[in-house]
Amino acid sequence: MAETGPIPGDVLEPVRRHLRDSSYDFDVGPGWRQLVLECHQAVVAEFPEYELLAVKQKWGALAFQAFPRPWRHGGAWTDAEHARLHAVTDAFADRSEGICERCGAHGSLRESRRIDLTLCDRCETVVPEHGRL
């Protein structure tokens, strides 16, 4: 699932600019890249300076883990800002539960592997037991 750094024409390049750790590789399949970009756009619309910690698949759903702005000792955001950020990212996690992580088609949660994945019927038959897309 992990990408190996930026690729030419990478749709996620704008998202990468918000990473706390620029060496981090996103851990989502290609079917969710557009969803990740849309989540980023929704977050940046409300929190232009947000800090991205991780983008990954967790329990078959998108986990977009971020802070409203870069963390600093003593606090950097209000509880209301943090709650609003989570409301935005949770909406995209909910959307991901119906999108195949491998190809982007309509999908559903598959619990037949060591890790839960959201896949379409076609991709369910080709993704191996270890779950790597």
Image: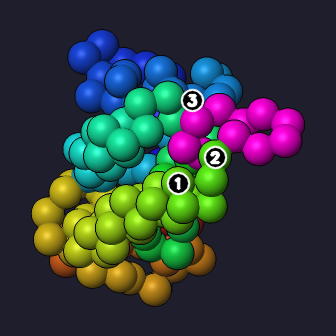
Relative height, residue 95 to residue 104 (above, below): below
The mark that comes first in sequence, 1 or 3, is: 3
Q: Residues within 10 Å of mark 2 (few under 14, many from 20)?
A: some
At x 25% / y 17%, what residue is drawn? 9
- Image quadrant where residue 121 sits: bottom left
Q: CA distance from mark 3 to mark 2?
A: 18 Å
Q: Secondary structure at mark 2?
A: loop
Q: Is residue 105 left or right of residue 37?
A: left
In the rendered image, the residue lying farthest to the top is 8
At x 34% / y 30%, what residue is drawn? 12
- Numbered range of the magenta stretch: 67-76
Q: Amino acid at mark 2?
A: Trp
Q: Nearer the viewer, mark 3 or mark 2?
A: 2
In the rendered image, the residue lying farthest to the left is 105
- Where in the figure is residue 82, as x and y percent of width and height? 57, 57
The answer to whether residue 70 of the structure is visible from this angle is yes
At x 43% / y 39%, what residue is drawn? 47
Answer yes or no: do the residues labelled 2 and 1 have beta carbons within 8 Å?
A: yes
Q: Main secondary structure of the magenta part?
A: loop
Look at mark 1 in the image and give the residue it sits on. Answer: 81
- Where in the figure is residue 16, as x and y percent of width and height? 47, 26
Q: Residues within 10 Å of mark 1 (few under 14, many from 20)?
A: some
